[in-house]
Every structure is written in C-alpha cells, then in structure tokens.
Amino acid sequence: MQPITQYVNPFLELPIWNYDGSSTYQAEGSNSDIYLYPCAVYADPFLQGNNKLVLCDTYKYNRKPTESNKRHICKTVMERAKDQEPWFGIEQEYTLLDDDMHPFGWPKNGFPGPQGPYYCGVGANKVYGRDVVEAHYRACLYAGVEICGSNAEVMPAQWEFQIGPCEGIRMGDDLWMGRFLLHRVAEDFGIVVSLDPKPMQGDWNGAGAHTNFSTAAMREENGIAEIEKAIDKLSRHHIRHIKAYDPHEGKDNERRLTGLHETSSIHDFSAGVANRGTSIRIPRTVAEEKKGYLEDRRPSSNCDPYSVTEVIVRTVCLDE
C-alpha cells in the first residue's frame, strides 16, 4: 500500500470548520465557537472508500491559536530550520487496560511474574493484546501514517509503536494520528489505551516517547562531531526540555524519570553510548560508524510531539 497522506492548504482544499469549545474547556458558552483549520488528510481505515480523516489545529474567536495548539509555533520553528533537514523518529510506548482500568491480561487479585520474559515476547502467557497492536499497525499503513515498527515492552500489557523517520512538522502530525487510530482500534476490542508515564507503581517500567533526532550534518561522514555538539547544547537546557517533555511541565515525568527502570534522573543531564540509563543515548552503531542520530530518552509517553520536536530544533538547530 502506498502512503496517501496529503498536506493541504487549509484555506483552499478543505473548509475551515468550528466546534463547541465550551465542551472542551477551551471557551465560554457565550463565545464558544473554536475554529478548526485542516492541516493534513489521511485515508480512513474504518469507513474506507473515499472517506478521509482530517487532522486539524485549533484557533480562538480572534483567529489566534488556542493554548493547546502547539502545532502553530512548531510549524514556524520547523520552517526556520528546514535547511538543516531535521529528522525525527518517536517510539510511542503505551499500556493496554481493561475497562476497569486494570492492566489487560493481569490477574485481577494479584500481579504477573516479575519483568524479564515479556519484552519482545511471544506466547499467551507472555504478551497480552497482540490483536489490538496488529490491527492498529494495519490501520496506520492504510491511513498513510509513517509507522515503521512495533514491539511488546518490558511491562506486561505494555507495547510500543514507532513513527518515522519524519521530517519537520510531519513527526507531530503522524504521531497524533497514530495515537487517534490506536484509541479507535482499541475501542473495537473493548480495551482502553493509557499514555500514563507510570501506570503501575512499584518495580515496573514506565512509559516514554523516546525521540530519535538527526540533522543532515549528523547523517554525513564524521557526523559524530555534530552529534556531540548537539548533546552539549542539550545539556545546557535540561530544565527547559523537561518542562516541554510532558503536558504538566515535568510533573508526570517525575514519576517515571527516577534513575531506575531504564531511565535517567529527572534532576540531572547525562549522555552515553548504548546506555539506557542516560538522558541522551548514542546508539552503539552510531558510535561505530561515527554518524547517524541521537536518542533523547526523556520525553514522556503523554508528551505533545509538537512541543518535543520544537524545543529540540530550537536548542540544536537555531541556538535559542
């Protein structure tokens, strides 16, 4: 199947629409209409045929972006840095829950065995919910979302799908559509999807949105020098990035980034080769080939990908 995502001029291809912002805590009832500006069009895997899913961003009565519209500023930043060709790949971790909000497949009055055999596992006693995962993958392929992989994660009932590589604003667009499709597919199975960064307290892994990033210079021969420069820049803006990496300015991530369970401490910046306990990981193949990309392991599973990609480009590409 060929991806058929189409990026549109919102003022020409599709109409600007509106909805009741008072029902979403974005406006008051006396002035409730919020504008929907179409941004990208995807094939609808549920209705199929000529039906489409339209991704939109939101604007207030005065045509200014709503507070939740992070796409507007992200697109501006990506345009300013497009000559550096910023590429992203985001690993979206999530947890499947029963409708009683208990992890899917877990004993109702206890816990499964300790972590170890579940990661990339196979077998009915190791993984739970594969039907949801594979149906979601097919839905993304049909829609034209740039999905490139999926795997069972360390905690049972926890999974991950990967979006990318995507350049610029498309990273946020495709991840948001991928999330929508995941929730929509899980609905048909009577299963709830949680993006909580630490859905189960105790000796269980949390959920992140590890963000892989590179520029054209990093991907060229001896690009490792550019990767090291980028890491140095990131080290000087740790707090700013932590605030941008979850919707509650680090409060959600504080439960996950403890220095345990393959995470760094939220309070410290660190980097290393093949080290999953650092803020920034340089993959071993990148260190060997001396070019490629870096992995920022700090973003939370419920992050806004527009905020994440925007702040990375600001820090690394625009020196802001």
Image (tube, grey):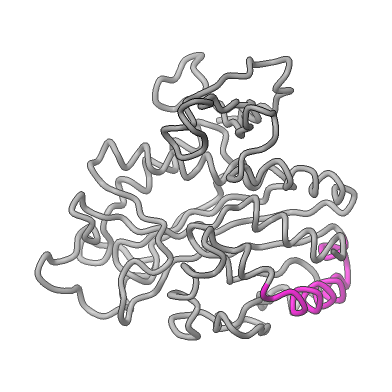
Residue 26 position within the rendered picture, expressed as x and y whole percent measured from the top left: 51, 38
Classify residue 318 by image quadrant.
bottom right
Image check: 263 left or right of 119? right
Magenta span contains residue 294 = no
Pinpoint residue 16: horizontal percent, then vertical percent.
Answer: 63, 19
Q: Residue at x 82, y 75 (%)?
A: 224
For the record, the magenta segment spans: 217-239
Q: Residue at x 70, y 24 (%)?
A: 8
Picture residue at 21% right of the left edge, 53% below the top: 98
Image position, residue 151 (x, y; %): 43, 59
Residue at (85%, 47%) from the top-left corner? 82
In the displayed structure, would residue 275 be above or below residue 227?
below
Which quadrant is home to the C terminus? bottom right
Residue 58 vs 225, above or below: the answer is above
Q: Residue furthest front?
A: 30
| Side of 277 relative to 166 (left or right) | left
Quarter of the picture holding the N terminus: top right
In the rendered image, residue 299, in percent from the top left (x then y), is placed at 57, 65
Magenta: main secondary structure equals helix
Please state which of residues 71 and 25 is positioned toward the viewer in this rendering: 25
* 3 over 269 or under it: above or below: above
- The residue lying toward the viewer, choosing from 90 and 320, is 320
Quarter residue 187 falls in: top left
Find out whether residue 235 is within the magenta segment. yes
- Across the whole image, how many numbered discs are drawn on residues? 0
In the shown orientation, is residue 239 left or right of residue 300? right
From the viewer's side, name the closer residue of 301 and 116.
Answer: 301
